[in-house]
Image (cartoon, rainbow, N blue to C red):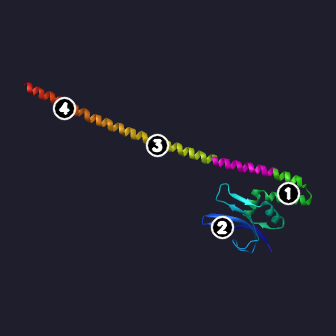
Amino acid sequence: MSVKIRLARRGRKKQAIYDVVVADARAPRDGRFIEKIGTYNPNTNPASININNERALTWLLNGAQPTDTVKAMLSYRGIMLKKHLQIGVLKGAISQEQADAKFGAWLEEKDSKIASKSDKLAAAKADVRAKAQAAEAAKNQARLDAIKAREEEAKAAAAAAEAPASEEAAPEATAEGGEAEA
C-alpha cells in the first residue's frame, strides 16, 4: 500500500482551506484518509501552515511520500531538513545534539524571515492607508477652496449688482432735481 501526504480541500467556493492528510494513494482527494496532520490556508498573506511536525516527520521516516505542494510546505516548515538531519543521525554521520543545533539555527533564521515579511506587509499596508488619507484630505481641501471661491464670487457679483443700481439712482435724482430747477 502506497501512502501519500497530500492536501484535502474544504471550505467554500473561492475560499479554499486544505487539510494536510496522510492517505492511501488510491483513495479519492477528499475521501478516506489515515490521519489528519495539519491545515493549510492560502488565503492569508503569508499563507498559514499549521502542521504537527512530529507526526509529519514520523510518517516521512516510515516512507510516506509527500506530493509536490506538501513537500514545499514541509520544506518551508523545516520538516524535510529535520528528516535529512535525522537520517544523518541514524547513519552515524552526526550526533543528535549537532542535528538539533543545526535545526535550531535554521528555525531561528526562518522565523526572522517570516517576521520581517509580516512587518513589511504591515508597513506597506499602513503606508497605503496614510497615502489614501493624505489624498482624501487634499481632495477635501480643494473642495473647500472651490466652495469658498464660489461664495466670494457670489458676494462680489451681488456687490457689483448693488453698486450699479445705487449709481443709477443717484443720477436720476440729480436729473429730477435739475428739471425742478429749470
Hey, which quadrant is residue 88 in on the image? Answer: bottom right
- Residue type, mark 3 in image: Asn
Q: Residue at x 92, y 58 (%)?
A: 92
Q: Earlier in the sequence, mark 3 or mark 2?
A: 2
Instruction: Say which residue label 4 marks.
Output: 169
- Residue type, mark 2 in image: Arg
Instruction: Say which residue label 2 marks.
Output: 10
**Is the residue under label 4 in contact with that under label 2 (CB below 8 Å)?**
no
CA gap, disc 4 to disc 1? 105 Å
CA gap, disc 3 to disc 1? 61 Å
Residue 110 vertical position relative to residue 65 in the rendered view, above or below: above
Range of magenta residues: 105-122
Q: Earlier in the sequence, mark 4 or mark 3?
A: 3
- Residue type, mark 4 in image: Ala
Residue 116 vertical position relative to residue 31 in the rendered view, above or below: above
Q: Residue at x 46, y 43 (%)?
A: 140
Q: Secondary structure at mark 1?
A: helix
- Residue type, mark 1 in image: Leu
Instruction: Say which residue label 3 marks.
Output: 140
Number of the front mark, 3 or 1: 3
